Amino acid sequence: MRFFEDMTVGQRRDIGSFTFTADAIKRFAAQFDPQRFHLDEEAGRNSLFGGLAASGWHVGSVCMKLLVADGQRQSAEAQARGEEVAAWGPSPGFRDLRWIKPVLAGDTVSFASEIVALRTSETRPEWGILQGRNTGTNQRGELVYSILATAFVPRRNFRA
Amino acid sequence: MTLTFDDFRPGRFGSFGPRHVTREEILAFAAEFDPQPMHLDEEAASRSMLKGLSGSGWHLCAIVMRMMFDGFIGDTASLGSPGVNEMRWLAPLRPGDDLMLDVDVVEARISRSRPETGIVTFNCAARNAAGQVLCVMVSPIMVRRRDDVVAG
């Protein structure tokens, strides 16, 4: 994972793709969001979604999964170069999450992340605050998911 | 009895729970969706900003969704949600937490594009047994209107 100083506004990364199988959709829904259109093909077809649809929280959680995996790949590359590896901080939240189109069974969603704002933290000078627009696009090129996420990222060589 | 749009009026809707959260489920969710050391490893977590093992914020979101389902969405003519206006993660989710969810209706309006549908915007706050608020979410849900109201 990268340090605050390595980041610039406008940087965009493709962070990977994920295929939402019917089994995965139902497994997540059974645990966290058992509305019928997330559990049953017939109920999904009869809903506004027009098919068995993934819970929006499943889509958001998969985006997080791919962000973490991408960060871990970057860490491994930095380590291979003999560089110091940054560990991300937690997130204070997000805004403007939009489930733009349903993610249906069999859809493959490709996620990307773009840095939209960077600032230093006044109360925690060892941390920077990143705001990123993360998006998901399905196999037909349709934007299905968008979120404005915020996270603490460590500053390089910070000395209090 | 299914709740429809007309059952949701601005103001306090209800409090739901408690929902007990185990260490095992925190670790299982983190392993699948958010495998950062602060959510998986006691030692790394103790050195993190959150000072101890904490659940993924996305796990907390998913638990809030389930608490909403068990509380009222399961008995509501829900058509799904277009998104979340805002989610603030204010304090970490800890193993063993017993969560309560306080739900308020912020706004209830009829959809302009689908007049048979209402849009109910909820403010949901999850708190632990000590009364500490872990997260606050503002999110709209589309809810079908009563047939006789729409026909009239």
Image (cartoon, helix red, strand yellow):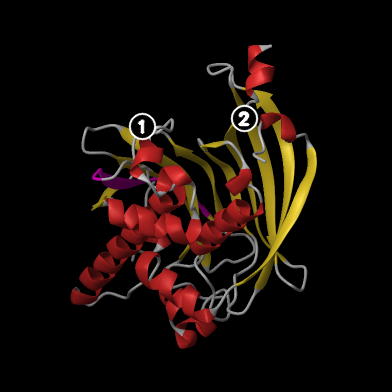
Image location (x, y in percent) of residue A109: 27, 45
**Does residue A102 lie above or below A16 as drawn?**
above
Asked whether, in this view, residue A6 is left or right of residue B12, the answer is left
Which chain's residue wears label 2? B
Which residue is under mark 1? A50
**Residue mark closest to the camera, 1 vs 2:** 1
* Magenta extent: A106-119
Q: Measuring 54% from the left and 18% from the top, which residue is drawn there?
A: B114
Q: Residue A80's image quarter? A: bottom left
Q: Is residue A117 magenta?
A: yes
Q: Measuring 56% from the left and 81% from the top, which residue is drawn there?
A: B52
Most distant residue in the right direction:
B11
Image location (x, y in percent) of residue A138: 26, 39
Q: Amino acid at mark 1?
A: Gly
Asked whether, in this view, residue A18 is left or right of residue B13, the answer is left
Q: Measuring 59% from the left and 50% from the top, which residue is drawn there?
A: B87
**Which quadrant of the figure contains the C terminus of chain A?**
bottom right
Could you say which is closer to the camera, residue A51 or residue B147? B147
Asked if the residues shown at circle 1 and circle 2 are in contact, with their CB atoms under 8 angstroms apart, the answer is: no
Q: Secondary structure at mark 1?
A: loop
